[in-house]
Amino acid sequence: MSSEGLAPSLDPSPVDANAALDDVLGTNNPPNELNLAAVRGLVSQSSLLRATMNARLSSLKAETEKILEDRKALDAQIRRYQGALSPLRRYPTELLSLIFTFAVHPMDYESDLEDFGLMGMRMRPWTLAAVCGRWRNIVLSQSNLWAFLCLDFQDFSRGSHIHRSWVVPMVEAHLNRSRNESLVVIFRMTQIRLSETEQRVLELIAPHSHRWERIIFCGPPALYNALSNLKLDFSMLRALDVSLSPDVDVTDEGMEDYEVTIDNFSVCPNVERVFINLNVDSGSKVPIKMNLGETKNLRIYSATNSWEYHSDILRYATNVSECWMGLTHSLPLVAETLLLPMLRRLSITTTGVLDFLEAPALEELYHSYYTPQLCTQLARGKFPKLWKLFIGARRQNIVIDWDDFLSATRTVTHLYISLSPQSASGLFAILEGSTGQTIPTTTGETDQEAVDGIASAAITLPTLHTLALNFDMFEGDPTSKRLDEDQLLRVLEAQWVQGQMRSFRMYGRVVPKLRSSTLEQIETLRRDGFDIVLERFPMMMVDGMADKDSYW
């Protein structure tokens, strides 16, 4: 073969090359010498072409990057121009000042604090002051924006972005900028001992205690020992919240009689709300001894403590209107009786507390669970104005005597109670009988309760406007039978037509098991105006007590 005959195989054109070398490229056959030379030539030519393309791409990439950088700079310039046109820039200082006031207004006392962070950096004036010079000048000129001081040292354990060395100068600046404003102070810590930073911060805020309006302290006994060694003035204090941190361990041997004493709160003439030891963990089992002195302005008291220390505070609280009392120890056999003439709402975890209370104006009573002793207490007529009664979790072996219960609660118009479906049958029988309805009689324990209910219909029944039932059921509990839906419907229809009941709430696992026909009849009552709520899950509890306002 002549040299001219080899030329076509060296043609760099991919189409011609593939056609000429089809027997090599399209098979797995070994190439001969001539084909090898042709393929090497093609690789060389293609590589040169590829290098040329890469060079062009590099040039285009550099040009593109330059264009992108120019565009980015232009975007920034446009944003600056647009910022100059923003209506916010033209807001008068007085309007911005008002907006900032609402933006950093001190929290409601019951609000969750977790999102504020140490020094309130997440949503407080420190953030606003960092936006621009004008905003900083406005924020620094408003002392009311610095009236909330959050010293949550627990934030360090959650990865705070504030270094410990910054805290003291920030607290100093914060106090100076607040000038003479009333202060809301939060101080929380988890360590067993105070660090040098925490001790120094206490010393900084103590001279300003005459400006404290609301305070929250939560920490170990060492915190309260340090407070007792400081000179404090609580003349302006209106709300006080002190508690031990949940890390306090009272399960160790020798800790059974452990208690914490806070000595220097004895003069709080204007305090209106007191919260003591409301942690639900081990810290709440330790009594805190406090002497608040004359507390005639106290309106709300909520605490977990020994009865003795409850008495120390409530003895002079003749104007308290709301009270929640948990106990760290058993009640004494003999104790002084507390007279609370203005008390209208009371929450307790132990029935025996009622033995030592005189509250003639009581209107609402919340109890963690039902006991026969509660009926005895209510039957004495100590609370003639009682109209709302809440009874929390059911105890498995306690049977409710509905005759005694309804006789003792004649003044109650709003009732919430936890019970079993079978126990509800006894209540329904009495309510049904009180409206003159006929109760079908068959056999069985539940029906016997219904018959007993008819016999007791002559008793003076409470005129229920609202009835809320929470069905607590235990595994293997013989009283946890299926709810008698026919009886439920008869009661609801009778109470709606002939009684004064206008609201019925039912909670628990029995709800999703109701027949479709039952649900249809309930929907008919709803359309007529009967407020009926069915919830699968039980009412939310906190320490055995429900949210007292959201269910009526």
Image (cartoon, rainbow, N blue to C red):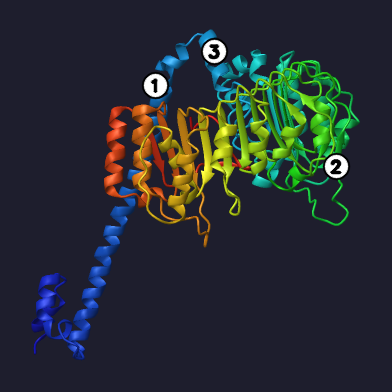
- Residue 91, horizontal then vertical, whole percent: 47, 11
Q: Secondary structure at mark 3?
A: helix
Q: Nearer the viewer, residue 460 or 35?
A: 460
Q: Secondary structure at mark 2?
A: loop
Q: Residue at x 85, y 27 (%)?
A: 291
- Residue 343, horizontal then vertical, whole percent: 68, 22
Distance between mark 2 and mark 1 Cα atoms: 63 Å
Q: Is residue 376 visible?
A: yes
Q: Which residue is mark 1?
A: 82
Residue 529, label in figure: none
Q: Nearer the viewer, residue 60 or 322?
A: 322
Residue 98, label in figure: 3
Residue 259, label in figure: 2
Q: Nearer the viewer, residue 151 or 326?
A: 326
Q: Amino acid at mark 2?
A: Glu
**Which quadrant does the N terminus fall into?**
bottom left
> Does 277 sit left or right of 543 as displayed?
right
Q: Earlier in the sequence, mark 1 or mark 3?
A: 1
Q: Amino acid at mark 1?
A: Gln
The quadrant holding residue 216 is top right
Distance between mark 2 and mark 3 Cα atoms: 46 Å
